[in-house]
Image (cartoon, rainbow, N blue to C red):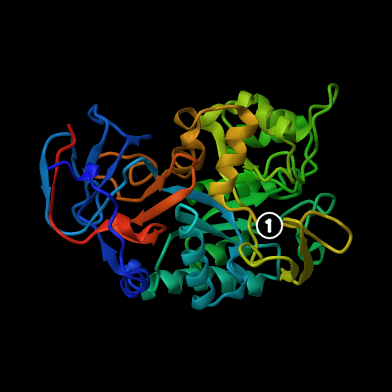
Amino acid sequence: MNNFDSEPPAFPSWQARRLRSRLDIAGIRGLTAQSVLGGVAVPPGDTLTLTCPGARIGPWHNEVIHLDGQFLDGRGCKLLPGFIDAHIHGGGGADVMDATADSLEAICRFVAQHGVTGFYATTVTASHADTLAAVANVARFADEARQTGARILGVHLEGPYISPQFPGAQNPAFARPPSIQEFEELLAVGPVRMITLAPEEAGAGALIEKALAAGVRVALGHTAATFEQTSAAVDAGASQATHTYNAMTGLHHRQPGAVGAVLSDDRVYAQLIADGIHVHPTAMRILGRCKGPARTLLISDAIRAAGMGSGRYDMGGLSVIVEDGACRLEDGTLAGSVLTLDVALRNFLTATGWSLAEAWPVTSLSQAQMMGVDNEVGRIEVGLRADLTLLDAEAQVVATIVGGQLAYLRDTWRLRQTNYELDNS
């Protein structure tokens, strides 16, 4: 029997409602897809079947197999490694700085709807006490095992050690010189995995050294650094640029600035907010040509307003006005975004002219390699975590699987409830 010749079943509305209500606990034994990107040793065939024993990826099959239990019917879809957002403040009305479990859970559920299986909870420049509370809250959230939807992979500290000349939408009242003592206290209370700082500020060199010794990635951003200062920070171990082009010294033909250092140095991973507001599509294309898919990181930089519509919102004590898809402070400064990674991917494909087969690492593998977690996620390989994203032909998210559990499913008919024998030949 080739199940892919049959019509999708029409679930009654009551059954669809029940299915949606329990998707966060729905495990699957496997899934099918028309094609796979990011896979290792994927067998040829028009349709492929992947088994998911527990939270891990099992073997691929292109012969007749029997799936006992629930499986995901991915006809006409492409399977990718789950998206990873390395820079996100919030979404769905919640913010990391709320420092509550409910807010983190809301963010986890929201981003899963957009293909994200893991993210780094990002703070803003704030008081030390508020930042400590946010970081400690992430640690408690993980310990309580309340997490549904996407996983929190750690904390990204955006500031507070930034340049007062390039605060962007960070609250300048809390920008301050680097403090080893503060940083050590943050390390002690929660899973800090990355910090964005301005390398030209006094004491930044010592903090970079401290961070690297603790296994924390260093990103350069909100910085007035020259080309030379940026390059020196990269030599010292900084490896990422925070929202490239934004809140940093620009590229001039006689003064290349931080942007010039980022684009010309193959050691640097470049974050990109691909919403068409922060960065012009041509500038996206230039970044893609300079960095390639292996060094380009699509991020959302989303705030609590993501998914909420126009209006006035708070971010780090500053009022943010959201209108026509743009987030701005009262003075017009861009203040984060309402972008989601699935939209960012589609925008990036349009801007660069790349195919999905070329660009897929910019949402997963590049992030995983940058953060040193590619032995667990970022690829589709037997034994790695079953963190997966299923896209349709228009690169719209069909399903998000986190550790073999369905975190989001757009089309309820795709979740098969009975035993099937699949002929994938």
State the residue at coordinates (72%, 55%). Answer: 325
Give residue 370's position: percent from left, percent from top.
49, 40
**Can residue 270 be seen?**
no
Near-viewer residue (150 or 115): 115
Q: Give the farthest residue toward the right.
A: 331
For label 1, the residue is 159
Q: Mark 1 falls on what kind of element? A: loop
The answer to whether 422 is drawn above or below residue 145 in the figure is above
The quadrant holding residue 249 is: top right
The quadrant holding residue 93 is: bottom right
State the residue at coordinates (58%, 53%). Answer: 340
**Can residue 241 be seen?**
yes
The N terminus sits in image quarter: top left
Near-viewer residue (245 or 31): 31
State the residue at coordinates (24%, 37%). Answer: 48
The C terminus sits in image quarter: top left
Give residue 18's position: percent from left, percent from top.
33, 74
